[in-house]
Amino acid sequence: MAAARTPLMAGNWKMNLDHHQATHLVQKLAWTLKDAKHDYAAVEVAVMVPFTDLRSVQTLVDADKLELGYGAQDVSAHTDGAYTGEISPVMLAKLGCRYVVVGHSERRQYHGEDDALVAAKARSAFGQGIVPIVCVGEGLDIRKEGRQVEYTLAQVEGSLAGLTAEQAAQVVVAYEPVWAIGTGEVATPEDAQEVCEAIRGKLREMFTPEIADAVRVLYGGSVKSGNIAAIMAKPDVDGALVGGASLDAEEFAKIVRYQSHNVG
Ligand SMILES: O=C(CO)COP(=O)(O)O
């Protein structure tokens, strides 16, 4: 079955760039991609920014009619109420968010988020028409034991629990092996393919073959312009969730434009 999945390159800025810097980076990214005549329908581009940057990014995207998508890095499982410090998906929808990252390994590690909470956040986002980018991936100890597939699939099962078929067909899954995040230690294209393929198999089992075929599975972890083409050459990798390299407009634009470089 031929899969027609549009690749997605999403930059996860993490806790970097204030709203002035955000405007500057988005402007530079948009200009760089425009100069390169980037076709957003061929490779979708999005930036996942701190909450405090969202209004500025929205204003710029709307004013300049940019095709760039944007979103937040977390969302509450609730829509309103006494949840001090949390941000509602209703608020994010009002700010024009197309995506929201949920279950990033840093949220799982530093904020104790488990699969059940991640699934609740994914459903919460969908409830307001925002597509969650659901992150999964094993730590170094699990990788050393060779249990990366088993571990990651258990996370997929738990983190996508309760999605309807319609939601499942739209969800984005990001496979980010924790040992490759921010370490410069990129998984080999074969490592990425092994787990991304297994994730698609799991989606087939949880939902339907058509849904599994439609879902975009991203790779994340030390993605750079020099290694992206080889990773994208793998059949079950449909894009990347890029941390550090997304903070540099030119470098991120090169990642987005991976098809214009040779496979290294
Ligand atoms: O965590 C990541 C993206 O969500 C990956 O971060 P780096 O690209 O900096 O390794």
Image (spheres, rainbow, N blue to C red):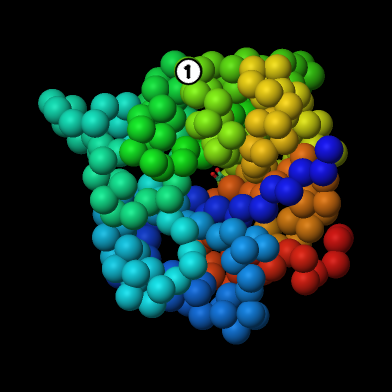
Q: Nearer the viewer, residue 1 or 104?
A: 1
Crowd around label 1: few <14 · some 14–19 · many ≥20 (10 Å): some
**Does residue 225 appear anywhere in the picture?**
yes
- Residue 13 x %, y %: 46, 54
Q: Nearer the viewer, residue 242 or 213?
A: 213
Q: Quadrant of residue 41?
A: bottom right
Circle 1 residue: 162
Q: Residue drawn 49% across and 67% down?
A: 67
Q: Residue drawn 26% across and 41% down?
A: 90
Looking at the picture, which amino acid does disc 1 mark? Answer: Gly
For the C terminus, which image quadrant?
bottom right
Position above or below: 9 against 128: below
- Residue 59 x %, y %: 29, 68
Position above or below: 187 against 113: below
Position above or below: 131 against 256: above
Q: Residue drawn 67% across and 63% down?
A: 42
- Residue 184 x %, y %: 67, 49
- Residue 258 x %, y %: 73, 64
For the N terminus, which image quadrant?
top right
Q: Quadrant of residue 43?
A: bottom right
